[in-house]
Amino acid sequence: MDILVSSNFERLLWFLAYEYAAGAGMDDAWTKQQAGQEVAAWHAQLKSEGGFSVNADILKFAQRDFDSERVTDEQTKRTIGEFFDSAKYVLDPHSAVGIAASLRSMARAEGVPHISLATAHPAKFAGAVEVALKDRDFDFASVLPEEFVGLADKERRVTNVPAGAGWEGVREIVVKQVEEELSGERA
């Protein structure tokens, strides 16, 4: 799985290619096939050249519905702090990026509805959240899920897996450890 190529982005590309191909006036099966071939070609070019281009019409289709922003680490921390001050809600850094981008976009596009969805729980990024809220009256325990309370104090177990063990080796280790746990041999 190539995590650098988001499946959501791949779906967006397919829908854009489909919309473009539909302009040819052919039947739906042909249009779907063309869209698939176009996306496959873009992915091949991405793999071989490190990038790809789409034609101007496809780009216009995307720009009709999407915008982009970039947010610095400082802006992210400031957004976490400002949102905490105004709403008493603790944002994770990823959600803060979305909020900061939406606020900027809203300032440019007055009256256009915007939606920002939280992408993670702040506990996943406790260190970053604590840095952003260090000068505020904030106790991380107030937003920590019950399952996380005391987790950092628990014993940590690490099992080294020999290089080249492959999935079979990992499976053997997991099975052995589960059997030990179930038989009470492992503390």
Image: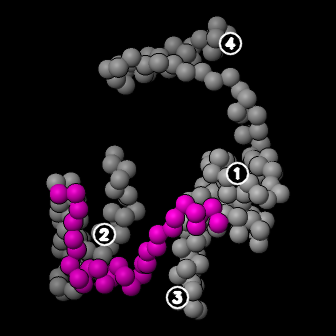
Q: Amino acid at mark 3?
A: Arg
Is 20 situated left or right of 175 in this image? left
State yes or no: discs 2 and 1 in contact (Cβ < 8 Å): no
Q: Give SS at disc 1.
A: helix
Q: CA distance from mark 3 to mark 4?
A: 59 Å
Taking the spot 77% from the left edge, 38% from the top edge, the residue there is 149
Residue under label 4: 187
- The answer to whether one can see residue 107 in this image is yes
Is the residue marked by circle 3 packed among few (<14), some (14-19), or many (20+) residues within 10 Å? few
- Name the residue located 71 percent from the left edge and 69 percent from the top edge: 82
Q: Which residue bears the numbered disc 3?
A: 108
Look at mark 2 in the image and give the residue it sits on: 13
Say whether marks 1 and 3 touch (CB < 8 Å): no
Q: Residue at x 63, y 15 (%)?
A: 181
Q: Which residue is mark 1?
A: 130
Q: State which tag comes first along the sequence, 1 or 3.
A: 3
Specify start and end residues of the magenta stretch as a single range. Answer: 49-78
Please tell me which of labels 3 and 4 falls first in the chain: 3
Disc 4 residue type?
Ala
Q: Say which element carries label 3.
A: helix
Q: Does 106 appear above or below 186?
A: below
Residue 34 in the image: state x and y as whole percent. Answer: 18, 71
Q: Report how far apart the C-alphas of labels 1 and 3 lie in the structure.
A: 31 Å
Which class describes the residues within 10 Å of circle 4: few (<14), some (14-19), or many (20+)? few
